[in-house]
Amino acid sequence: MDGSSYYIPAAAMGVALAAKAPALIRGWRDPLLRSVGVLLALAGLVFLFAAPPTIAEVNALTGIPNISAPLVYCVLSAFSASCLVLIINWRGGPPEVTRRLSRRWIAGYSVVSVALVVLFLLGEAPQERLRDLDTYYANTPFIREMIVLYLAALTVAGVAMNVMCWRWAIQVRGWLRAGLLVIAFGFMFNIPYAAAKFTAVVAQWNGGNLDYLSTDVAPVLASAGAQISAVGFCLPLACQRIGDNWITWSTYRRLGPLWRELKPVSTFADRAVRISWWSSADLQVTQRESDIHDGMLGLYPYFDSEVRCLAYDAAVAAGSEPAQAQAEADAAMVTAAVRARSADPEGRVISSAEATAPFSSLDGPRDLVRMSNALRQSPVVAAARRQASTRSESDFHERTR
């Protein structure tokens, strides 16, 4: 019997767990990270042990027919508890409340797992059944109770997950809310899954035969629910990461005009060591900001406070807010300084400034993105650039005599 539909998701969970392993090892004391690790491990084990070839192999290795049944049911119960615990830790709150609720669910499903094993040992299931154990042994004492118990436990988990996810979804917005709704929708499949199983079992109790509900319909519902829930757990994290990367790369791109403005008079383009193009977005932005700061550091002797003041007044007169006007004024002073530096290839201004304080500087933090946008969009900066291009050489020769 082909088990690829089980083994492929199990392998995917194993890869995800391996990828998370370094973070899990470093932050094992973090309840949320620990819950994620346990959830991934149990999800992989559910798919692994529920595969018919694995069921047959486990039965053969142990020599006990149908021993895989309580094993799979116990893993399913542990997986249900891990999902509940993950939602509790993900939602957060007072640590003592979070721990208390987590321990209650873990204790409850631990009791269920022990009861499943005890009921199997008390019952008799000598004929191996790989796909239809629930209906084949529906009338067998103790095995019947084991089946009802695991279905009831799954139903409780599905209802509890829906209640917690819906309550939390009402309080949040964005991708987190979307993820919670998807998780709730996925766990809602637990209810029709259990209903299909219960219907087939009850039919056997009454002499009927609706086994197809258990062997054909229920597995499809379980698979769909598990995959939908997995998407729900991944959605907020993945979309948040994509959104963060988008913002970071947008910042990198918006810093481009200022970086290119400083490039002709800066030394960062000639550095022997540069970060690779495949480096992370955060590292790329940090490098670009460092290049900009280094470039402006070399321009300090050429900064002219009069250019900044005139540009600030012009920006305010044009209707700019104070923060925007300051960015335009700083950008105007930078673009004028770049042209002044270009008109002073021998660095006479720098030499004369070594014995005195710089003419002006960009003291304190500055909004580099606003400055970069102003270089590209502001008419005030464009006017300062034109004026500096025509006057910088004569002005700086005059200042260095």
Image (cartoon, helix red, strand yellow):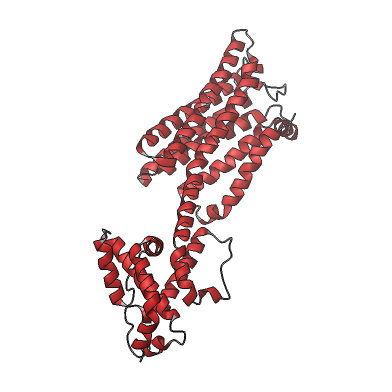
**Residue drawn at 51 percent across, 59 percent down:** 281
- Left or right: residue 56 versus residue 198 is right
Between residue 260 and residue 380, name the one nearer to us: 380
Query: Is residue 96 rendered to the left or right of residue 74?
Result: left
Query: Quarter holding the N terminus?
Result: top right
Q: Position of residue 315 (x, y in %)?
A: 28, 63
Task: Name, please, the residue furthest toward the front.
Answer: 390
Residue 209: give x, y in percent of width and height: 64, 10
Q: Is residue 114 visible?
A: no
Q: How many marks?
A: 0
Residue 180 image point, x, y percent: 45, 36
Q: Quadrant of residue 401?
A: bottom left
Q: Nearer the viewer, residue 150 or 317?
A: 317
Answer above or below: position of 89 versus 77. Answer: below
Tell me which residue sits at (46%, 32%) in the image: 161
Residue 61 in sight: yes
Residue 254 is situated, as x and y percent measured from the top left of the image, at: 44, 59
Which residue is at 54% across, 24% downward?
151
Of 124 and 293, nearer the camera is 293
- Which residue is at 46% across, 87% downward? 346
Q: Is residue 337 above or below residue 27?
A: below
